[in-house]
Image (spheres, rainbow, N blue to C red):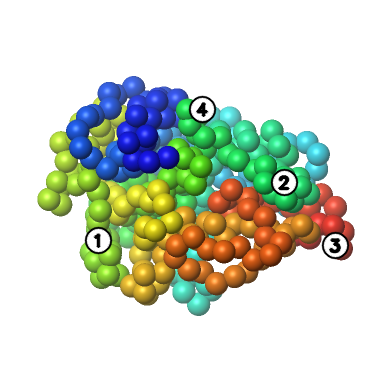
Amino acid sequence: MQFHDLVALIFLITASAAGFECQSSSGSIRASDELAWRTLGGISTPTQSTGAATTETPVSWRLWWNYQEVYPMHPGPQPPEPTNTAGQFRKLPCQVESERDPSHQPQDPCEVIWLNDASVGYVFANKFWMRENVIKEAAASQISFPMSPRPMAIEMKTEWQSVGRRATDRYVTGVDLNGKTRVLVAFHMMMRAQPNWVWATFIHEDFARQVSEAGATLNDSFGNDHGRPSKRLSELLKCDHVEVLSHYKLIGTQTDFATLLGNPLIELPEAIQQKKISCMSCHSHAVINQIGQMLSFPVQSGQPTLPPGADSTNFNFTLSEHASCEVVLAKKCVNH
């Protein structure tokens, strides 16, 4: 799918996937940048659903499932039935940052991965919480998450920090399992608007200088007007009632393997400086072999060559990392 195809689909995608109602703009812009902002606005419209603390920003994507709810430690043949997923806010289930090794973890890490209904519905429909089913369908090249014009699969990797002395009115806020209020500082968003997905990454304006310090630049043809939110973006966020998002910067979007894209609050800045960070190339490493092992091979930008016996899970690490064997049997199903 080329950029002009994305332009034609922007309104349809966001309307079907996120309940988008505001009109799409026209003009010569990079379609994937507009797609990223319009999708983000649509999935962030505040909701009156219960469970949010008074200190939290009630963005609607906080009602999505997190991977811990989708992939049980001890799977069975019936879909997981986690509590508090029926339209209620849950506290942030903080995890360590997945793209950093133990020696580079922040002092108080808090990463949460969220999956929308289209993603979770696909996992449940195919019983992909069980690794045996992932192995079978990956080997047959049959894993394909919902793509537009159907409601498209969307996943978000979000990074949160303690409030400290920050003015929380400029941040999306949440409360973790320990009752600590946190602020959203950065996030990746992957959208299945084309076979290889469309990738976008955002950072809060307070940390934007770290992008240039890592040797990269902000590249946003839709939302950036000489360092300030563009008129188009301001109108969009006002329409979606999420003006707080004006304090976040779109670092860039990616629709092909040739593009480099990274976020210094998610990946190591040194790797960005060395031109090794590519969302699409990284997620192409979401593979397993025919007994369910994840295969390790060198990270590289561009389209990688998969090693023999590596079967793709459609760029989706939540499948290859978190699906578990119903029965662990040597040479038939091993966890990770």
Can residue 303 be seen here? Answer: yes
Give the image location of residue 283, x and y in percent. 52, 56
Task: Decide which of 277, 185 is in the foreground and name it.
Answer: 277
Q: Residue at x 25, y 49 (%)?
A: 220
Q: Which mark is residue 156?
A: none
Secondary structure under badge 1? loop
Instruction: Characterize the local packing of mark 1: few (<14), some (14-19) or many (20 or more) Cα atoms within 10 angstroms.
Output: some
Would you call the spot at circle 4 few (<14 residues within 10 Å), some (14-19), or many (20 or more)? some
Pick whichever, 13 or 208, lies toward us: 13
- Kindly identify the amino acid type of the residue bearing the numbered disc 2: Ala
Give the spatial CA distance, label 3 vs label 4: 37 Å
Please name the residue that numbered disc 3 is placed on.
Answer: 331
- Residue at the image position 20 percent from the left and 37 percent from the top: 28
- Label 1 belongs to which residue? 217
- Looking at the image, the residue that sits furthest to the bottom is 103
Q: Position of residue 253 (x, y in %)?
A: 35, 50
Q: Which residue is mark 2?
A: 140
Label 1 or label 3, whichever comes before in sequence order: 1
Q: Nearer the viewer, mark 1 or mark 2?
A: 2
